[in-house]
Amino acid sequence: AFDWLLMCDDDSYVNVHYLADLIQEGEQTGVLNATKPHYIGERMRNRDSAYKPFLAGGACYLLSRKALQQLRAKLPQCY
């Protein structure tokens, strides 16, 4: 089982210690909670007129377990 999932490209540099500290501090202060849907990263949208947001992976993004579960439930609608 996991609490957080970090998605990034293979050419991204991640300071794992800083990331772990950021998550730990967020959990201790109540700002972050893996049982609630959290997305940390840049939210992009398509260039066409319809607003279709998507997750920008170039600079990495972090998903809580709950956010990933909600995303998984929506995946069949994406195809």
Image (tube, rainbow, N blue to C red):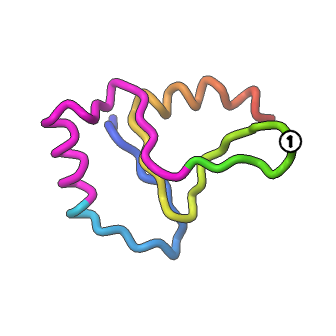
**Horizontal placement of 1 versus 55: left or right?**
left
Label 1 sits on a secondary structure element that is loop
Q: Residue at x 49, y 34 (%)?
A: 68
**Horizontal placement of 33 versus 63: left or right?**
left
Three-letter code for the amino acid on which mark 1 is drawn: Ser
Instruction: Residue 51 in the image: state x and y as whole percent.
Output: 76, 37
Q: Residue at x 50, y 27 (%)?
A: 69
Depth check, front residue: 51 or 32: 51
- On-image quarter of the N terminus: top left
Which stretch is magenta?
19-42
Q: Residue at x 15, y 35 (%)?
A: 29
Q: Quadrant of residue 38?
A: top left
Instruction: Residue 50 in the image: state x and y as whole percent.
Output: 83, 37
The mark tally for this picture is 1
Q: Residue at x 22, y 54 (%)?
A: 20
Residue 8 is inside the magenta segment: no
- Which residue is under mark 1? 49
Depth check, front residue: 70 or 55: 55
Residue 14's place in the image compared with 29, above or below, is below
**Horizontal placement of 21 versus 61: left or right?**
left
Residue 21's place in the image compared with 77, above or below, is below
Instruction: Residue 44 in the image: state x and y as whole percent.
Output: 64, 50
Residue 41 is inside the magenta segment: yes
